Image (cartoon, rainbow, N blue to C red):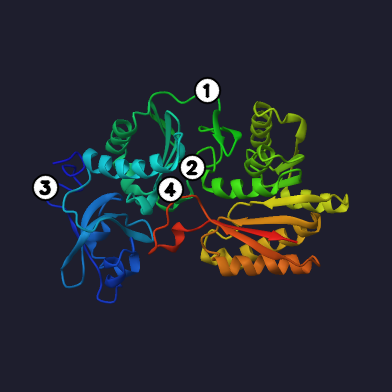
Amino acid sequence: MSQAASSPDTDATLPVVRLTPKANARAVRRGFPWVFANEMVLDRRTKALRPGTVAQLQDHERTPMGLVAVNPNSKIFCRMLDPEGTDAPDQAWFAARIARALDLRQRLFDAPFYRLVHAEADGLPGVIIDRFGDICVVQPNAAWADVLLTPLAEALADVTACATILKNAGGRGRSLEGLDDVDAALRGQAPDAPVPVVMNGATYLADVTGGQKTGLFFDQRPNHAFAARLAQGARVLDVFSHVGGFALAALAGGAASALAVDGSAPALALAQDGAARMGAADRFAVRQGDAFDALTALGEEDEAFDLVICDPPAFAPSKPALDKGLRAYERVARLAAPLVAEGGYLVLCSCSHAADITAFTGACLRGIGRAGRRAQLIHTGGAGPDHPLLPQLAESGYLKALFFRL
């Protein structure tokens, strides 16, 4: 019996949690990975389960439906771990899933810089693992992964042979699960300098200990590449640039110049370092400050660019924020469109899972239209294949990138 299965939470016999008669058991059987609190029989025993407990899920007729992780403190009461499982996860269980995820990434990429585990889509619900060469950064954004972090990290080390494994506790999901925000080194020592990452011919500097998310956004890699194809000889503006995402890719693609705008001075400093390592410092400039203010100011300065990219944070991180978020996306498009030279390109991105592609496209077109411009939609991009989509879970297909010619 594994370490987890012999704990007070799981003992020799796993606890049982049960669906109500009105719950959508069919959706769970077809692969939907979550069960919400309002679908559960919430008796005193079930409510008393500790967050992260591994349990057997049954339908209302007491038919087993699989192995789940339970958190009575979360709206997502159960996360499906294994529809065929009967024993709580141990190191070997984690190793099998990580090895399967690693096999895909090694087929896709010739260097070990990628998202290694993309949560539910890779069979580890709530778990994000990004790899930076010999370093793995783990975001255990669900209570069960926090409880079983030791066997998870040991399996990760065995499968990848990475010397350094870091816990990043900054994920938004952790607060929703009632978890701490304490980062830690689970294996080895945290690096004392940013990690260089080469993608699409550009050099990025990832701050894996103090940067946003895990230090770099691997999901935009294919969209960076597409933008780089439009950038030959172009004047490029990259707004919400972080560490130079689109700007550095455009410089690698032959852009005449690139201006990166971001609110974070440390992120822009990393972008400048990346440009210098690429030998492109003379073609690269930065502007630190609020993105909306910068877009407004550039318009007042009558600036024009051949390629403008806006990749903001999630303006609509949840359904209640959708309307406000769509208005923000429309405003970005309205302010950015006048900065695009005639025949130039505008790239508008959203990482809000609550705003689907139809709603996001509508907001962008409204903004472009209000700016007095007309557009051709030439390409629609999503996250790279190291961020696989679980078809039954729309939230796993969060990223959208729309490429317009104005």
Residue behind mark 1 = 192
Amino acid type assigned to the residue bearing label 4 in the image? Arg
Amino acid type assigned to the residue bearing label 2 in the image? Gly
Horizontal relation, residue 162 to residue 13: left or right = right
- Dot 3 or dot 4: first in sequence order is 3
Q: Residues within 10 Å of mark 1 (few under 14, many from 20)?
A: few
Question: Mark 4 near mark 2, Cβ–Cβ under 8 Å?
Answer: yes
Residue at x 16%, y 73% (from the top left corner): 61
Residue behind mark 3 = 12
Amino acid type assigned to the residue bearing label 1 in the image? Asp
Label 4 element class:
helix
Instruction: Report the number of discs.
Output: 4
Q: Quadrant of residue 139?
A: top left
Task: Measure how far apart labels 4 and 2 are at the Cα level.
Answer: 7 Å
Horizontal relation, residue 246 to residue 301: left or right = left
Q: Establish if 157 lies above or below 116.
A: above
Residue furthest right as drawn: 301
27 and 337: which one is in front? 337
- Residue 338 location in percent, x, y? 81, 58
Residue furthest bottom as drawn: 22
Q: Residues within 10 Å of mark 4 (few under 14, many from 20)?
A: some
Q: Nearer the viewer, mark 3 or mark 1?
A: 1
Task: Measure how far apart labels 1 and 4 are at the Cα level.
Answer: 25 Å
Residue 45 appearing in the image:
no
- Residue 60 location in percent, x, y? 20, 72
- Residue 180 location in percent, x, y? 42, 42
Residue behind mark 4 = 174
Residue behind mark 2 = 170
Label 2 element class:
loop
Return the mark for residue 114. Answer: none
294 and 358: which one is in front? 358
Residue at x 66%, y 64% (from the top left corner): 377
